[in-house]
Amino acid sequence: MNQNEKKSFKLLHKPPKGKVPALCLVFLWIALWNVIFQALHGVMPHEGLRIINWAFFISVAVFFLQEELSYKDRFWYTLCGGAVGLLLAALVSLGAKALMGLGLSHFAAVCIPLVIIIGVLILTRPFIPMFFNDVGFVYLICSFIESDKMIENLPSPLLSLLLGSIILNLGASAIIMLYRKAMAKKAAKKDE
């Protein structure tokens, strides 16, 4: 956005020329990998509606939410921030178990490491933003969905974050770059 442009609230916006077709291609890429990933993991009928391994798919959501960053920076902020968030969640879980072992109530045992970890995440952000950022916070919070299995399953969400970042985010970035190049060539030919 141009610095001279004012942000205003509008219910409907006219997207920039060429953005919708690019987003359609990205949508098809993400939809394809959602189907592939679910098919590879075989959703069981008795489990109800369950998205297999949220860490894979949430990477693309946070990737596109970071509009102020370049695609390269988005990739690294998503990957590094997500990994830090998952590791910090494991530390909260380990800390809570250790404190409960010392006789603290469940409430205190969870709150003490959680407050410390959230403080670390927020207060270190200005110094190391690639690792301590909003993506880390999202992964920290989302990892508590299955907090009872956090430590034993830690390699799985870390690997899924890596694969999601590589497959979904790099793939979507490549699609957008190729689309933009094709549109630039088309515009250059039209100008000739």
Image (spheres, helix red, strand yellow):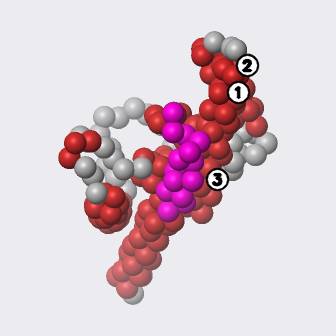
The outermost residue toward the right is: 127
Residue type indicated by callout 3: Cys
Is residue 36 at least partly visible in the picture? yes
Which secondary structure, mark 2? loop
The residue drawn where x is 64% and y is 53% is: 80
Whole-percent x, y for residue 177 in the image: 47, 71
Residue ID for mark 1:
98
Whole-percent x, y for residue 10 in the image: 35, 35
Which secondary structure, mark 1? helix
| Above or below, 25 relative to 60 | below
CB atoms of marks 3 and 1 within 8 Å = no
The magenta-colored residue range is 148-163
Q: Nearer the viewer, residue 118 or 183?
A: 118
Residue ID for mark 3:
80
CB atoms of marks 1 and 2 within 8 Å = yes
Residue ID for mark 2:
102
Crowd around label 1: few <14 · some 14–19 · many ≥20 (10 Å)? few
| Above or below, 72 relative to 88 | below
